[in-house]
Amino acid sequence: MTNANPFSENINKMKGSSTLKAAQAATRLREEGHKVIDLTVGEPDFDTPEFIKQFAWEGLQKGLTKYTPAGGMKIYRESIANFYNEEFGSNIVPNEIAASCGGKQGLFNAIATIVNQGDDVLLPKPYWVTFPEVVNFCGARNVYIETEETDFILTADQVKEAITDKTKLLIVNSPNNPTGCVIPGDEMIKIFDVCIEKGVYVITDECYLLFVYPPAEVFSGASLPKEYLEYVCVAGSFSKTYAMTGWRIGYTITNEAWTKQMIKLQSHSATHPTSFVQYGCAKALEHKEKSLNAVREMLDQYQKRRDWFIPALQEIEGLKVAMPEGAFYAFVDVRGLLGDRFKSSADFGYQILNESHVVTTDGEGFGADGFLRLSYATSMENLETAVEKIRNFINSK
């Protein structure tokens, strides 16, 4: 007799990525011949800076097409350590760094190597869609922290209140996906202090680290004194800030013991990120000012879009949205529109998708039913068209 569900309990507990489902919906409409305004994309619409491509090509020409150590090439780990030490005044050494195939794998490695079945993991809402699914896969339990009362900014008091004897880990993400909120550096330090005092580990997802709009300030957990790394793991990525999503290259920074465990895990999965990509990233970081200038140019464009897009959305009756301090997302509250016409934010998204061909990401996947995530990592023309379509859609009927 065939088993109706032969797959592992771990994978059965996981849900598919809602952000990828939204992107697939956009692809389907395009294949049907529709002009689609896609506001789901969680990646820069800019190309990878040309000089980074050239560095990767240089790596190919040097013959860097073989296996590397599972933890990453020496030049890669050294360049990341040097970058953080120069930019943030940290004291990182290469053995505290592990290369990963994108920030996502780094996060998976970090979670999988620190939690046990039955542990509690604190997860502030709204959260990035992958966090709870990795926790589920590892057999731990998600314990959610509501942050709407503090405008989606996690506080040390909220963390302190949520910690119990079963709490093993806190996962924090700032700048935040999906809200664009930035936790102030002094509050982050308080959060770390609360966790360390209670023996709770912290993974801080810094995927959007450099995408912070003034007057908010860039803060990295790697900037703290070395003793913090006994409990804190920083997950970083080149994907967003350097427009390299398809290159699949990231890293983690933590104490050597935890790093060794992540390298051991990765040695049995992806082994390591692509060799010449590691080289290209390393050389880019060696040219720090050139790389940071490329980031600033992209950030300037995102800020211009943000400064037009958010006020335009705020003018549409029934929508509420705060000005994001980082990343490139608008987190839109549509609860004022729910009722007879729209049963939920998912229903709103479904209707505007099929009637107006505007693709959004429902907040339910982020633990925030009643909200939509709209990405402004697209052209001003698309944003202007999207606002017009959203306004007309809401005002129709």
Image (spheres, helix red, strand yellow):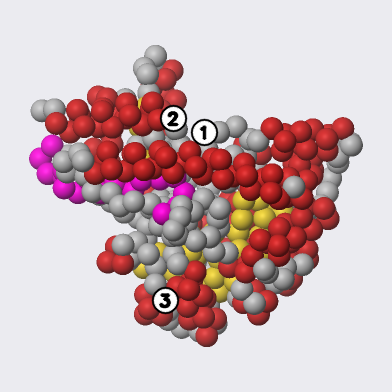
Left or right? Give the position of 140 relative to 112: left
Q: Nearer the viewer, residue 141 or 377?
A: 377
Instruction: Residue 214 in the image: state x and y as whole percent.
Output: 45, 55
Q: Is 107 above or below relative to 392? A: below
Where does label 2 land, which residue?
379
- Residue type of the residue flagged with mark 2: Ser
Q: Which stretch did the figure color magenta?
A: 325-341
Q: Quadrant of the C terminus?
A: top left
The answer to whether residue 76 is left or right of residue 328 is: right
332 inside magenta stretch: yes
Vertical comparison of 248 with 23: above or below = below
Q: Residue 237, how many percent across, how many down?
A: 62, 51
Query: Residue, x 20% and y 39% (percent of image)?
Result: 316
The local secondary structure at tag 2 comes to loop
Q: Mark 1 points at which residue?
A: 45
Q: Report, in whole angstroms, how far the alpha carbon at label 1 lies from the one at label 3.
A: 35 Å
Query: Which residue lies under the disc numbered 3?
Result: 156
Amino acid type at circle 1 is Asp
